[in-house]
């Protein structure tokens, strides 16, 4: 057809013949070979979905002919092949689908129309906590507690699996979503009714990017955007800049994939890659295993990119074979990638990028990151100095009264500032990588042989990202060595990396609080934001699994492990880290023997079945969910109350009050409820009012399916600093009604404004909303009555989530911020000029003395589709009206 670029070709693989949309048919009009791998995947997606309406010939031309050094301000639609969820963010998605089934019935529609239209796979990994550790029965005990706490949620998910089409749930205690994705769920190339196309996915977790390591384009989105994709809505995005990273050399002796990814994170954060694609290429790829690539791709959110992708090559196939994919699927992946020009070899010509950076693998040195941000890399040699500098800063705000004498488990010792109280081998970032896990096991083996042990104040845990990890550690004969140092398998889930570190032993926790000690956690995770790992731990360092074990032995970050002894052997001699550090050759020899395809096949053979606890959950199949009004876990959200078929249009925001005036780098961990629920906070009080005992509070994450809990915990992080309450940390504010009221919880202040019909806003600095793709950071914001957020800049996912919930995202113009404009939160705010497609609005802030400040703010509703969502009150309302109509 002359009005379409679509051209199908056939591809024979073995005895089967498939069809695919041929990118090479766009030549010679467009030079497809020059395009980055990631853009070829995008181009195929646009080509396949060309319909003349949502996706047009002009979209294909813009993408195929793009000059990546001078990109047009052009939006395109992207439709992922599938959606992947974890249970913290996935439960609200399923809750919203259940609520939409109720709402569509009230609008006269068919409830069964509300179903995922693409494959949706949910992995339950965010619920288990490290309540028990340091013993062989810790795994079973933690799983038992997990099921007791989450029975309602798990029953609800079983209902979803029965009621919703195209929806699967991987049961608890199986693994971490991103590791299960790369090891089992990812197809790399999809096949549907004989048509081949690249695998791609959206995930309700920012680390969905991990699958980029095996050539699958995917990234984290908010739960709202994921729900839209589940229901067939394409996601609108601007054609992205693509930053190429040319990789050369190979890792030096002693350097790990963790050291590499922390270096990459630091490098790319300095470059600035927010809202950009990052693509790795160059001869050094031949020296990076797929597991190393997965580690680098996993931390895409930490370096700020939309994705951090590697092309398909022989190493991709090796990994697919290792993890038990069929030879038929592997052959399809290879044939399709070669046919579409998506296959990489060292001789492949370099694509055209927006910019190119250089990464020399040989320059990588042992590193950690911390104590409060993942991009703050610190060389192993500098950790002691880094801790002491951070400690000096802590001393000014909260002077230490340490050391403290602690008696716990029959031992008495001095707990000092810098003590490592948590050492966790955790997170798919590193437990997906056999080299660093085997490295940790070998280090433990050498340490055990010399008589070394972990210090008694260290809470140790090993939480693998899949069952396969435990199997290959057993096969390698290393599991007992890790256990000797306290690293017993405690769970198969995210655990410490997401703040599910569980309680410290009571005497230790009391000593820290009573003496305001600045203690440390060392974890093999990807996030170490303030207050994330544990509320009592001020210093948090990201490290490779071998270094996690080393710091458990040392017991402190106030030590230079490169030059000071880590401990003493049984014969009284000093032992240094170099004495127990395994060589690269030792590690690779064990990996080659212990990590096998048969092991992965066995681990995933019956992955959807679950254990006896999961199988014992009984549900009754029904079109709509039988809501329990007494449940404090699952509740019907209020988004659709009073909804009609007529969209409300663009709201007027006048007489608004500031709920919070915040600084730079406010993360979704600061905004969204996470971690333990405190009994004296609004959420804790609500639970107790509803008959929930303190011991049964569970975590905020486990209660994401109940809006009453979540809105009470929004902006309630103990480390958040609101300029409206100087000198007072935590989720507090002041209510203004002529005069400033007392300092109160943010929830209480917000509800006073809501009751009075007063809209609210939030003022913030740079990088507002950075961090995990927490949809409750946006949902909680709108439920508190916040109608607009004005920041200096937004992180990509949170900005989209705000639009998706009907909150107006605005940016101060360059060079301005709340401080420069003299705004302190006591003002009332009027917004003028907000019309469909507006690029900026006029804001007037009126002070109590009658004076006012006027300024312009940039509107960050980026696309026509987003404007449609905003005018409907949010994406869920938009989709519901489409389905009901």
Image (cartoon, helix red, strand yellow):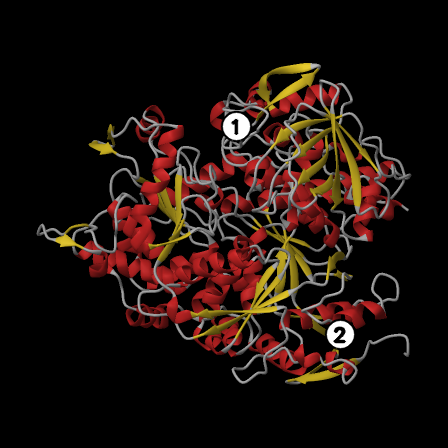
Residue 214 located left or right of residue 46: left
Secondary structure under tag 2 reads loop
Q: Is residue 728 among the parts visible in the rendering?
A: yes
Label 1, residues with CA under 10 Å away: few <14, some 14-19, many ≥20: some
For the residue pair 759 and 113, the one nearer the viewer reads as 759
Write down the residue under mark 2: 65
Quadrant of image for the N terminus: bottom right
Q: Is residue 672 among the parts visible in the rendering?
A: no
User: What residue do we see at 20% from left, 51% from top?
Assistant: 564
Q: CA distance from mark 1 to mark 2?
A: 50 Å
- Expressed as whole percent of the image width and height from the top left, the position of residue 24 reads 73, 82
Establish if 85 lies above or below 530: below
Write down the residue under mark 1: 730
Secondary structure under tag 1 reads loop
For the residue pair 350 and 87, the one nearer the viewer reads as 350
Asked where in the image residue 634 lies, by quadrant, the reply is: top right
User: What residue do we see at 54% from left, 23% from top?
Assistant: 681
Residue 707 located left or right of residue 75: left
């Amino acid at each position: 057809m002359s009005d379409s670029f679509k051209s199908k070709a056939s591809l024979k693989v073995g005895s089967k013949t498939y069809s695919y949309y041929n990118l090479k048919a766009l030549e010679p009009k467009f030079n497809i070979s020059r395009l980055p791998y990631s853009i070829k995947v995008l181009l195929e997606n646009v080509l396949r979905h060309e319909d003349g309406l949502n996706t047009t010939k002009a979209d294909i031309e813009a993408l195929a002919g793009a000059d990546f050094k001078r990109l047009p301000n052009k939006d395109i639609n992207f439709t992922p092949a599938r959606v992947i969820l974890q249970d913290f963010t996935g439960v609200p998605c399923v809750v919203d689908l259940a609520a939409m089934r109720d709402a569509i019935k009230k609008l006269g529609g068919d409830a069964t129309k509300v179903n995922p239209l693409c494959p949706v796979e949910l992995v339950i990994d965010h619920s288990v906590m490290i309540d028990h550790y340091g013993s062989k029965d810790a795994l079973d005990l933690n799983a038992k507690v997990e099921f007791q706490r989450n029975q309602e949620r798990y029953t609800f998910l079983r209902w979803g699996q029965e009621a919703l089409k195209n929806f699967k749930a991987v049961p608890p205690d199986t693994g971490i979503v991103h590791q299960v994705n790369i090891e089992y769920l990812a197809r790399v190339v999809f096949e549907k009714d004989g048509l081949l196309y690249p695998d791609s996915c959206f995930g309700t977790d920012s680390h969905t990017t991990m699958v980029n390591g095996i050539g699958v384009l995917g990234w984290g989105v908010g739960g709202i955007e994921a729900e839209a994709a589940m229901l067939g809505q394409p996601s609108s995005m601007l054609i992205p800049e693509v930053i190429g990273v040319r990789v050369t050399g190979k890792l030096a002796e002693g350097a790990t994939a963790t050291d590499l990814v922390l270096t990459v994170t630091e490098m790319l954060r300095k470059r600035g890659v927010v809202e950009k694609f990052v693509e790795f290429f160059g001869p050094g790829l031949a020296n990076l295993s797929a597991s190393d690539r997965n580690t680098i791709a996993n931390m895409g959110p930490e370096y700020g990119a939309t994705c951090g992708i590697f092309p398909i090559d022989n190493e991709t196939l090796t990994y697919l074979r290792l993890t038990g994919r069929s030879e038929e699927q592997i052959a399809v992946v290879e044939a399709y990638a070669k046919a579409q020009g998506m296959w990489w070899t060292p001789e492949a010509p370099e694509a055209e990028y927006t910019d190119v950076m250089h990464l020399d693998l040989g320059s990588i040195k042992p590193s950690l990151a911390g104590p409060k941000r993942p991009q703050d890399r610190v060389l192993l040699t500098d950790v002691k100095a880094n801790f002491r500098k951070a400690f000096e800063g802590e001393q000014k705000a909260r002077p230490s009264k340490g050391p403290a004498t602690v008696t716990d488990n029959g031992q008495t010792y001095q707990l000092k500032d810098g003590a490592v109280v948590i050492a966790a081998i955790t997170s798919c970032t590193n437990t997906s990588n056999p080299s660093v896990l085997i490295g940790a096991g070998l280090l433990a083996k050498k340490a055990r042989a010399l008589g070394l042990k972990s210090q008694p104040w260290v809470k140790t845990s090993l939480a693998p990202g899949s069952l396969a990890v435990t199997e290959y550690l057993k096969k390698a004969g290393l599991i007992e060595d890790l256990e000797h140092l306290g690293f017993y398998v405690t769970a198969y889930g995210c655990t410490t990396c997401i703040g599910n570190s569980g309680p410290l032993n009571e005497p230790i926790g009391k000593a820290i609080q009573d003496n305001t000690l600045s203690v440390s956690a060392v974890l093999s995770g990807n996030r170490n934001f303030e207050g994330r790992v544990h509320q009592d731990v001020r210093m948090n360092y990201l490290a490779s699994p071998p270094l996690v074990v080393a710091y458990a032995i040392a017991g402190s970050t106030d030590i230079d492990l490169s030059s000071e002894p880590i401990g003493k052997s049984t014969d009284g001699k000093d032992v240094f880290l170099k004495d127990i550090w395994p060589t690269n050759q030792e590690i690779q020899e064990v990996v080659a023997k212990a990590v096998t395809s048969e092991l992965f096949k066995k681990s995933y053979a019956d992955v959807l079945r679950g254990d006896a606890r999961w199988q014992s959950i009984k549900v009754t199949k029904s079109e709509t969910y039988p809501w329990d009004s007494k449940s404090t876990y699952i509740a019907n959200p209020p988004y659709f109350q009073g909804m009609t078929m007529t969209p409300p249009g663009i709201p007027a925001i006048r007489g608004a009050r500031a709920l919070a005036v915040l600084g730079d780098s406010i993360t979704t961990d600061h905004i969204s409820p996470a971690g333990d629920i405190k009994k004296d906070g609004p959420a804790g009080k609500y639970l107790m009012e509803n008959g929930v005992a303190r011991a049964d509070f569970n975590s905020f994450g486990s209660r994401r399916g109940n809006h009453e809990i979540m809105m009470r915990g929004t902006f309630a992080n103990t480390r958040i600093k609101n300029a409206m309450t100087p000198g007072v940390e935590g989720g507090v504010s002041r209510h203004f009604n002529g005069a400033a009221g007392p300092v109160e919880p943010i929830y209480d202040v917000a509800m006073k404004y809501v009751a009075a019909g007063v809209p609210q806003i939030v003022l913030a600095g740079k990088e507002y909303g950075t961090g995990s793709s927490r949809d409750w950071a946006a949902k909680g914001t709108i439920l508190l009555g916040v109608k607009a957020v004005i920041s200096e800049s937004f992180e990509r996912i949170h900005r989209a989530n705000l639009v998706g919930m009907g909150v107006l995202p605005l940016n101060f113009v360059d060079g301005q911020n709340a401080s420069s404009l003299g705004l302190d939160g006591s003002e009332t705010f009027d917004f003028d000029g907000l019309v469909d497609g507006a690029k900026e609005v006029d804001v007037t802030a009126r002070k109590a003395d009658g004076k006012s400040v006027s300024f312009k703010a940039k509107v960050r509703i980026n696309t026509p589709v987003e404007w449609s969502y905003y005018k409907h009150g949010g994406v869920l309302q938009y989709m519901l009206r489409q389905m009901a109509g």
